[in-house]
RNA sequence: GGGCAGCUAGCUCAGUUGGUUAGAGCGCUACGUUCACACCGUAGAGGUCACAGGUUCGAAUCCUGUGCUGCCCACCA
């Protein structure tokens, strides 16, 4: 490499923008991220949790993808055949709602104006735009996904997998049709899932309504009173329920309360006593009536529905709690989840009174056509007029709202497709309990197991247009024989009776609808599948299933899934279920759940709150590496991450704390420079014209600073490489013998132990630990200590090359270890070293191959265990301690930094011998002249002393001594030491301690006491000395 | 209502099976820029480990309880 030109000197500051562009180009040119199935190589694979195509990536995505990339880059460097599968999610209702909203805002059109085909077309166009943006952001972040394999949950390959999986479920009888109360969004006119519903407290009322008993017999109650928050639903009532055994139920309620009282703290007992009184009162006042009603229910008696006059049965059902309300409850099976259960149990009619748009239908009789609100008002007025309204209470109600339209949700009974979970769930439960799928941290396994063990059927149909259309067709008026004939020999078609004379036909063949059976058309189900259905197939659908591809064979089951805890049930559990069902194998071996990022108030970040940080702002201002490093250091095991956010003034760079008040303002005036800037809320033209002030957080700065530190350490190394022949470093052996300086043995030892610790931390998903170790080692040990020590040797031609070799070895190893967290700066430096330091191979590199052309595919460090030398590390610690002691005295005495002081060190023979080679280093690092070192050294009269690790350091301060400062320092020191000694003495004097503590602990305490006493004696002498001089 | 987690320096967080004087980064104070780096260096100040009991020779760490914060699940005629 002699013919290499001397590299131009690097700029003082690392330019992340230029480096990021260069590195991405380099990686793309080499396609190092690409993984091709190959025999004989151990695979490591991760599928990305596909981001929704609804918008841009946020900080949570940045964290999630940084950690995946960290794992992937580490494994790739470790030699695994590494695949990171990228892609995006079509996100069903979320995407359709966004596009529909824009359509309404910008074109004043509804989806019905546009029609199914056109709307879906519009959404595809949206998807193309946002997918591109999201993938671009992932690249900006440095994600080393296999960009040749980008998938989308709705693309042809995934769609084929969805049809196949659904068809198999259908064929095995695991798909059922059933009524279900869905959360109906009357604005969007679609069902939304439970997790798209939020509850809000609103002021409402509790109406008590009297239902008259039909033909009451003597002694029977003439009416029953029920209470409701939604009086208009009585139009859909099909029964009134009473508990079948009120007395027993009251006994049970009383028993439960007594048990609760016994366990409750005193202050809650009074409240429970009131409840007990209430139960007693009911027993007195209501029980006789309830008993009669229960008997009447058994006899099949009826009550008259107010307003409509319809007779409805009294039914006996445990749902009616005698200890609550009047003890009776109206049953509206089509509009309340609990009533639906009762209706199912008791075989009641399900009377739907709503139209899809939220108005009442013909079943509501005279109220048909009214909105729910108007119907409620009218029903209440009519009840009052009819004398059926007993009383009205004020009450705060938790009302369900749609997250998409922000309008109230109506429970609405609809036919839905379900997947039966009873059989499917068990293998997925077993996989986790048996440890074949390991969830980290393991406490999250509980929510997975609890949820799955309920084995609730999965409602998979959605009344939407954007998604995988359910591959089921309906046909009527044909016989099974005709079906058999029509589909003879077709193993891609299956059918089942609809229990009403027709048939449901399921097929993987999209063109099935073009066929007719026996002259009758096949009508396709209009619904699409829950977006989580395609997500559940993601690990195998992306690898080509149901085809038996080489990718599937090589990379499935995948290695690790990295995700956040809120989708453990929605997504993780269903992937395990469907993975096992489709392939017979688990989808991944481990699941790592990472923390969530919260703002300074502990609230989750969201665009709608305006409290988020845009990762692109951080990438732009501080660099992708800064973002990645900060996020990695936050990925601790137990805690969510709180991130205080600031606005950065684009004019002067001043940081303004983001608060609940200012985070929703369209513009902010900088308190420092006075200039205004706009935020994400800006919409007025005047505001939009202002420069944008990004939301940032100081917490990313340490990452930026770390990049710069590495950069400047490199500058230093490169500046000192002139004339260095270079060549492989594989032959050097820092552990070999006396010729190797202490600091070199120390560095080698630290490189080996840090490599081990960092590797172990990453293996165990202790990412923050890995980041901290590397930061501390690179900064405090490599830069502050080792690099400083090398300065003297680099000036000495005889010792120069050894120092350069070790400097390169240290820098090289650090680069490799840091690369998975900070790929850009490390790659940029690697490229500079490639030109300047030539063929520089480490012992763990392949001796037969040239040095990697990209750090991305360089070998992960594996320093030999023999490099680890605890004795050297201890000895080096003593050296650093001595330097620190001299520096401290200098600082106390205000000795000018450039002035050299005379220092003598009294140290035991062995220590002195080991420190001897560090003579010059002590002098250079502490700006001292070391006059003597040995067991018999004594300080001069004007010396300040310090004791460190068995050595006494004497700093001659004849010219500088500030007696008062020294007296203050020593007095403090004496007091402190005395305090420790007292504590120790007390501990040792305790007979229990001596008797019960382990021998080793007692011995250690004694040794420490002796050391402290020694130190106290010396410090006290010194103090007395200074005091006498004062006089 | 059930469950989980957290409470450690001004802020954000570490603290490995209980064992010296509880650490880091940022911020703060003082000093320092011909020296790889001021996105820096040296030194310093700053903590009753939420609270109350208990176990132990010894508790930030283990147990019980309390308070506050956040999240998940269920439910609310």
Image: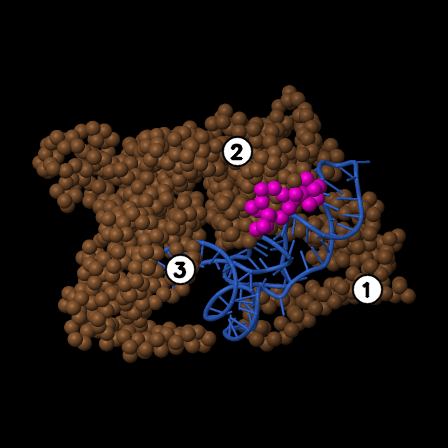
Chain colours: A brown, B blue
Does A600 sit left or right of A791 as displayed? left
Q: Position of residue A316 (x, y in %)?
A: 21, 66
The reply to whether residue A548 is visible in this rendering is: no
Q: Chain of mark 3?
A: A
Q: Quadrant of residue A727?
A: top right
Q: Position of residue A418 (x, y in %)?
A: 26, 46
Q: Nearer the viewer, residue A128 or A342?
A: A342
Q: Alpha-carbon distance for marks 3 and 1?
A: 79 Å
Q: Main secondary structure of the magenta part?
A: loop
Who's the residue at 32% across and 75% down the image?
A279
Quarter of the picture containing the C terminus of chain A is: bottom right
Q: Which of the marked residues, 2 or 3, is nearer the chain's N terminus?
A: 2
Q: Chain of mark 1?
A: A
Does A569 sit left or right of A988 as displayed? left
Circle 3 residues within 10 Å: few <14, some 14–19, many ≥20: some
Q: Quadrant of residue A451?
A: bottom left
Who's the residue at 53% across and 53% down the image?
A602
Q: Which of the marked residues, 3 or 1, is nearer the chain's N terminus?
A: 3
**SS label for mark 3:** strand
Q: Which residue is mark 3?
A: A204
**SS label for mark 2:** helix
Q: Which residue is mark 2?
A: A140
Question: Does A661 appear in magenta?
Answer: yes
Q: Alpha-carbon distance for marks 1 and 2?
A: 61 Å
Q: Alpha-carbon distance for marks 2 and 3?
A: 51 Å
- Marks 1,2: beta carbons within 8 A: no
Q: Which of the marked residues, 1 or 2, is nearer the chain's N terminus?
A: 2
Q: Chain of mark 2?
A: A
Q: Quadrant of residue A342?
A: bottom left
- Magenta part of the chain: A653-675
Circle 1 residues within 10 Å: few <14, some 14–19, many ≥20: many
Question: Does A584 appear in magenta?
Answer: no
């Amino acid at each position: 490499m002699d013919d290499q030109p001397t590299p131009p000197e690097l700029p003082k500051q690392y330019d992340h923008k230029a480096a990021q562009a260069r590195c991405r180009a380099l990686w793309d040119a080499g396609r190092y991220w690409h993984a091709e199935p190959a025999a004989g190589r151990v695979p490591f694979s991760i599928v990305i949790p596909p981001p929704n195509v609804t918008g841009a990536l946020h900080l949570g995505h940045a964290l999630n993808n940084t950690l995946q990339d960290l794992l992937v880059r580490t494994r790739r460097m470790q030699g695994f055949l590494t695949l990171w599968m990228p892609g995006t999610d079509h996100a069903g209702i979320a995407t359709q709602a966004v596009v529909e909203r824009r359509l309404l805002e910008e074109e004043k059109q509804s989806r019905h104006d546009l029609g199914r085909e056109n709307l879906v077309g519009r959404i595809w166009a949206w998807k193309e735009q946002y997918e591109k943006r999201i993938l671009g952001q992932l690249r900006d972040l440095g994600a080393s996904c296999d960009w040749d394999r980008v998938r989308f949950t709705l693309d042809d390959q995934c769609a084929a997998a969805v049809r196949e999986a659904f068809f198999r479920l259908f064929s095995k009888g695991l798909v059922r049709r059933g009524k279900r109360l869905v959360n109906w969004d009357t604005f969007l006119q679609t069902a939304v899932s439970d997790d798209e519903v939020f509850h809000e407290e609103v002021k409402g009322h509790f109406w008590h309504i009297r239902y008259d008993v039909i033909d009451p017999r003597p002694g029977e109650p003439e009416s029953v009173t029920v209470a409701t928050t939604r009086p208009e639903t009585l139009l859909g009532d099909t029964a009134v329920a009473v508990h079948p055994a009120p007395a027993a139920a009251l006994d049970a309620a009383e028993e439960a309360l007594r048990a609760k009282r016994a366990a409750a703290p005193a202050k809650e007992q009074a409240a429970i006593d009131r409840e007990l009184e209430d139960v007693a009162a009911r027993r007195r006042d209501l029980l006789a009536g309830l008993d009669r009603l229960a008997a009447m229910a058994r006899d099949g008696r009826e009550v008259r529905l107010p307003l409509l006059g319809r007779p409805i049965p009294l039914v006996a059902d445990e749902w009616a709690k005698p200890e609550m309300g009047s003890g009776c409850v109206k049953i509206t099976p089509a509009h309340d989840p609990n009533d639906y259960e009762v209706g199912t149990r008791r075989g009641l009619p399900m009377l739907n009174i709503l139209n899809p748009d939220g108005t009442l239908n013909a079943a509501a009789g005279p109220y048909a056509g009214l909105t729910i609100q108007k119907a409620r008002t009218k029903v209440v007025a009519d009840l009052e007029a009819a004398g059926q309204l007993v009383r009205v209470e004020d009450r705060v109600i938790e009302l369900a709202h749609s997250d998409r339209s922000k309008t109230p949700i109506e429970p609405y009974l609809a036919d839905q497709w379900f997947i039966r979970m009873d059989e499917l769930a068990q293998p997925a439960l077993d996989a986790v309990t048996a440890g074949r799928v390991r969830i980290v941290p393991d406490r999250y396994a509980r929510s997975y197991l609890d949820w799955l063990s309920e084995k609730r059927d999965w409602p998979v149909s959605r009344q939407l247009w954007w998604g995988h259309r359910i591959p089921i067709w309906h046909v009527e008026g044909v016989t099974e024989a005709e079906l058999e004939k029509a589909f003879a020999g077709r193993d891609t078609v299956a059918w089942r009776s609809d229990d009403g004379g027709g048939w449901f036909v399921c097929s993987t063949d999209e063109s099935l609808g073009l066929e007719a059976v026996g002259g009758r058309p096949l009508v396709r189900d209009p619904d699409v599948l829950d977006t989580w259905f395609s997500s559940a197939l993601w690990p195998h659908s992306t690898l080509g299933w149901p085809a038996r591809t080489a990718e599937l064979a090589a990379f499935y089951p995948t290695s690790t899934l990295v995700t956040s805890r809120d989708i453990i049930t929605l997504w993780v559990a269903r992937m395990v279920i469907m993975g096992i069902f489709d392939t017979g194998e688990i989808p991944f071996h481990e699941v790592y759940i990472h923390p969530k990022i919260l703002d300074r108030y502990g609230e989750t970040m969201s665009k709608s709150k305006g409290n988020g940080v845009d990762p692109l702002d951080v990438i732009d201002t501080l660099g992708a590496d800064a973002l990645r490093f900060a996020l990695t250091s936050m990925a601790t095991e137990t805690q969510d991450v709180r991130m205080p956010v600031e606005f950065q003034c684009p004019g002067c760079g001043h940081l303004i704390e983001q608060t609940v008040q200012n985070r929703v303002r369209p513009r902010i005036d900088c308190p420092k420079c006075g200039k205004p800037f706009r935020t994400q809320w800006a919409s007025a033209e005047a505001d939009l014209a202002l420069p944008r002030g990004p939301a940032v957080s100081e917490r990313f700065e340490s990452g930026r600073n770390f990049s710069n530190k590495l950069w400047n350490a490199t500058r230093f190394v490169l500046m000192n490489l002139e004339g260095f022949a270079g060549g492989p470093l594989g032959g050097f052996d820092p552990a070999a013998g006396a010729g190797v300086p202490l600091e070199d043995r120390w560095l080698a030892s630290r490189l080996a132990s840090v490599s081990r610790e960092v590797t172990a931390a990453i293996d165990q998903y202790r990412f923050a630990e890995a980041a901290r170790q590397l930061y501390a080692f690179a900064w405090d040990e490599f830069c502050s200590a080792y690099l400083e020590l090398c300065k003297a040797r680099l000036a000495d031609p005889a010792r120069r090359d050894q120092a350069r070799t070790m400097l390169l070895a240290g820098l090289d190893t650090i680069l490799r270890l840091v690369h998975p967290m900070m790929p850009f700066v490390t790659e940029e430096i690697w490229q500079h070293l490639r030109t300047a330091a030539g063929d520089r191979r480490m012992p763990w590199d392949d001796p037969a191959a040239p040095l990697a052309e990209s750090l991305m595919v360089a070998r992960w460090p594996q320093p030999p265990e023999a490099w680890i030398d605890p004795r050297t590390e201890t000895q080096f610690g003593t050296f650093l301690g001595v330097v620190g002691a001299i520096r401290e005295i200098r600082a106390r005495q205000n000795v000018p930094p450039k002035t050299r002081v005379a220092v003598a060190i009294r140290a035991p023979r062995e220590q002195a011998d080991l420190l001897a080679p560090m003579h010059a280093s002590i002098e250079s690092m502490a700006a001292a002249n070391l006059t003597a070192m040995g067991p018999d050294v004594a300080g001069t009269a004007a010396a300040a002393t310090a004791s460190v690790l068995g050595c006494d350091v004497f700093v001659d301060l004849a010219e500088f001594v500030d007696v008062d400062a020294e007296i203050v320092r020593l007095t403090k020191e004496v007091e402190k030491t005395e305090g420790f000694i007292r504590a120790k003495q007390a501990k040792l004097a305790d007979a229990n301690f001596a008797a019960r503590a382990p021998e080793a602990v007692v011995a250690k305490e004694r040794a420490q006491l002796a050391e402290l006493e020694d130190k106290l004696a010396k410090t006290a002498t010194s103090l007395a000395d200074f005091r006498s001089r004062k006089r």
